[in-house]
Image (cartoon, rainbow, N blue to C red):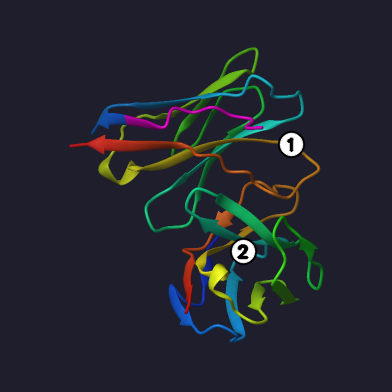
Amino acid sequence: DAKTTQPPSMDCAEGRAANLPCNHSTISGNEYVYWYRQIHSQGPQYIIHGLKNNETNEMASLIITEDRKSSTLILPHATLRDTAVYYCIVQGAGSYQLTFGKGTKLSVIP
Amino acid sequence: DVKVTQSSRYLVKRTGEKVFLECVQDMDHENMFWYRQDPGLGLRLIYFSYDVKMKEKGDIPEGYSVSREKKERFSLILESASTNQTSMYLCAASGGDRVFEQYFGPGTRLTVT
């Protein structure tokens, strides 16, 4: 069973904020939310992760709802180089494997 | 940033050949992983290693073996390549207990003919 649900595709105008949603209604208390992206023909790239507090780094911000059933990845000023498939992954302890779903294909439009 | 390099971007081998895929990371990370990525199937873990000479099977280890003699290097071996092993192979590394903060290499696209 998929642990996360993401829209299959989204468009965003260059320079605007890209807000990528993810539903994870069955997340348990010790599971983290991770975000990765994969630009065409490259390996996946780690972006950010969080447990329940909002997180920000040089690449993005992660907003997790208070009930932890959904989250949003925010790219504050999208560029053409942000065009990629974005994966939201729920992961807890007890496994070494990252389970990638289908993700959201983000297209940044000039 | 962690840098993970893979020995080849593209590789073409014949059925039955022994194939070595090499992965090197430069940040002294304990954990290293080999995945394969196929359209419609996503990434699937083949093997991982959490220390030198230690290895654990992932979801699809059949037909593969691995070697980790040094901390920075993790090799994937296809003992006798078959056409169904044609795929994109991705190596990743992560440090200590930050298991899921994985840094990936650029991938090797292997074609077995």
Q: Is residue A82 visible?
A: yes
Locate residue B101, reporting x and y percent. 62, 47
- According to the picture, the residue beneath numbered tag 1 turns out to be A92
Check chain identity for marks 2 and 1: say if they share one. no
Magenta segment boundaries in residue numbering: A1-10
Q: Which three-letter amino acid code belongs to the residue tagged 2? A: Met
**Chain letter of the residue carrying label 1:** A
User: Is label 2 in a helix, a strand or a loop?
Assistant: loop
Task: Determine whether label 2 and label 1 are within 8 Å by CB.
Answer: no
Q: Quadrant of residue A100?
A: top right
Q: Which quadrant is the C terminus of chain A positioned in? A: top left
Q: Which residue: 78% across, 40% down?
A: A93
Q: Quadrant of residue A42?
A: bottom left
**Chain letter of the residue carrying label 2:** B
Q: Which quadrant is the N terminus of chain A positioned in? A: top right
Q: Nearer the viewer, residue A107 or A62?
A: A107
Q: Which residue: 46% across, 78% down?
A: B11
- According to the picture, the residue beneath numbered tag 2 turns out to be B27
Q: Is residue A31 above or below residue B80?
A: above
Per the model, the C-alpha gap separating discs 2 and 1 is: 24 Å
**In magenta segment, residue B85:** no
Locate residue A37, reporting x and y percent. 46, 44
Q: Residues within 10 Å of mark 1 (few under 14, many from 20)?
A: some
Q: Which three-letter amino acid code belongs to the residue tagged 1? A: Gly
Q: Quadrant of residue B77?
A: bottom right
**In magenta segment, residue A3:** yes
Q: Is A53 left, or right, of A31 in this rendering?
A: left
Q: Residues within 10 Å of mark 2 (few under 14, many from 20)?
A: some
Q: Which residue: 70% across, 47% down?
A: B98
Locate residue B102, reporting x and y percent. 61, 52
User: Is label 1 in a helix, a strand or a loop?
Assistant: loop
Examine the residues drawn in magenta and state their main secondary structure.
loop
